[in-house]
Image (tube, coloured by chain):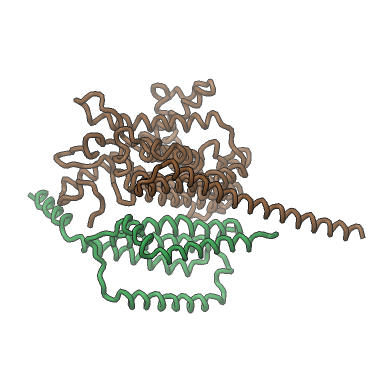
Amino acid sequence: MVIAADPLLLGPIGLEVFLIILIKVVASFVLLMVSVMLMVWFERKLISDMQNRIGPDVAGPWGILQTLADGIKLFFKEDLIPENADRPVFKLAPYLSLVPAFLVFAIVPIGGDFRTGDGTVGWFGHRTFLQVADPPMGILLFLALSSVAVYGVMLAGWSSGSKYPLLGSVRASAQMISYEAALGLAIATVFLTGGSLSTHEIVSSQSNWNWNVATTGVVPFLIFLVAGTAELNRPPFDLVEAEQELVGGFHTEYSSIRFALFFLAEFMNVITMSAIAVTLFLGGPDGPILVEQVAWIWPILWFSLKLLAFLFSFVWLRATLPRIRYDQLMDLGWKVLIPLALGWFLLIAALNVGRDRGWSPVPVVLVSVAVLWAGAAMLGGAVRKARAERRAIELGSDEVLDAGDGA
Amino acid sequence: MIAMAALQGFDSLMSGDTVVAQNIAFGILAVVMIVAALRMVTTGNVVHAALYLVIVLAGVAGIFILLGAEFVGVTQVLVYIGAIVVLFLFGIMLTRGALGEDEEADTEKRRMAVLVGVLVLVVTGGAVLDSFGDAAVNRAAPSLTAEIGDTIFSQYIVPFEAVSVLLLAALIGAIVVARKD
């Protein structure tokens, strides 16, 4: 049975291969943990700079060990469980949000030469991909895991047995479910241009500057970024933990190491979402090899740089934008992003069919846009008519009531 | 010497027949699923019941993956765990905030539920046995996503579209029923 196309797994699986897989698993775990640690520090330091403060500067050089200190402190704090809590679910929830965050990183290719080679690197005489797993349905796994991550937030709020966490988790889960649709549709355009669900195939179809951000025409990339930010519950979409309204959101009742796990999951999700964005739209590890002697290091370096750019923009967004209102959030998700993503998806599909049939792209685009516009206009007209009729009925019934009052 | 022998044993285990490993995995999944299914119908807490249902559905996804149907397995997680049970939980959370045992869950309707459950089991089980019998799954050729897509959009296009229209009708119907005006 072919589990993955990784050349490592095609031959006989001996101890050596098993050890390589083990190294990859441990390395990806350690890499992710260390990056989360640095990410928390990076965010605090950068926000401080943007707000003209100093930020953490006591633990280690430039305060770089601050996260470690906080982690140790949280670990030794008393672990409180509220009296009204549903204990097993309350204990389970932090892991439900942490584990999917870890697993997503397994399908991200973080290196390997895709320009001249096939994206493999040589390790102890075996060729392998620089990713833990390359399942054929790759990116679908990301969507599946991000829908599983909703459980952590939802159950944390419910099992706390308290009002504010419940409200926070209802908000959060509604938000995450709504934006998952737009996220999935934006990713679907990548399937159309890349022709595969496997992350390795998607990256190799983008080698030599053939990045999906351009080939899918920027719009899906922007939709992915907005929907991704909302999916992460990051500012400006952080209504989940709006302190002024909800105390602390879904994790109000959590303390000690359980709170730390939520915090860890949140930052880990920021990193994995950025990594997925780089993989899908910015060519993953694709980039020029500048010094031939250390050719293996360049893809990893390019990947890290692109990742860092995303992480920086997430922090930047947090420091710059005010939180949006809940109705604005829902309007943006359902009435703007989903129709736009769907329309763009259909446009790219029409272009693909046109290319297969040898049609000229210009009339294909014009006809598609005309058809989509006509569809949108019909739908909009129907909505407006229904609204006008409803208003007429409301006014009519009010008049009847008024007349009744008068008599 | 012992280490060497252990290494050789390990090698033969890893390169040996994967069917044995698959059978063991199936056994574990089946036991977990049966226990979770029984707990689901016996627990008095609605949210716990939904969570046991998640375990059962995850087990189904696991069995699909064991059979090489990775796309169906992931779709199972995406649709059933990620959407349908989330919707159940959402409904429960919005309508009843109280934690703990739910007395209403244990009513006279239980007998009727058992009857319906047995009927569904007999009908679906009979249908599966009738159409497949002892036919074995070809484990050497896992079903590819592209192949599934091709079959849905060529051979099964009419049933696929019919189901889509049905779902759309259900969706619009739900909105019409839910609207007050």
| Front residue of B88 and B176 | B176
| Front residue of A161 and A43 | A43
Which residue is depicted at the point 91% across and 57% down? A406
| Front residue of A159 and A106 | A106
Q: Is residue A34 placed above or below B136 in the rendered structure?
A: above
Q: Is residue A12 placed above or below B106 in the rendered structure?
A: above
Q: Position of residue A118 (x, y in %)?
A: 23, 40
Which residue is depicted at the point 36% across and 44% down? A193
Which residue is depicted at the point 55% across and 75% down? B109
| Chain A image colour | brown
Q: Which chain is green?
A: B
Q: Quadrant of the N terminus of chain A?
A: bottom left
The residue at the far left in this view is B1
Q: Is residue A230 visible?
A: yes
Res B128 → quadrant: bottom left
| Front residue of A79 and A242 | A242
Res A264 → quadrant: top left
Q: Is residue A206 placed above or below B96 in the rendered structure?
A: above
Q: Quadrant of the C terminus of chain A?
A: bottom right
The residue at the far right in this view is A407
Q: Is B7 displayed left or right of B97 in the figure?
A: left
Figure label count: 0
Res A187 → quadrant: top left
Q: Is residue A263 visible?
A: no
Q: Position of residue B144 (x, y in %)?
A: 30, 56
Q: Position of residue B110 (x, y in %)?
A: 52, 75
Which residue is depicted at the point 48% across and 69% down? B42
Q: Position of residue A82 (x, y in %)?
A: 55, 49
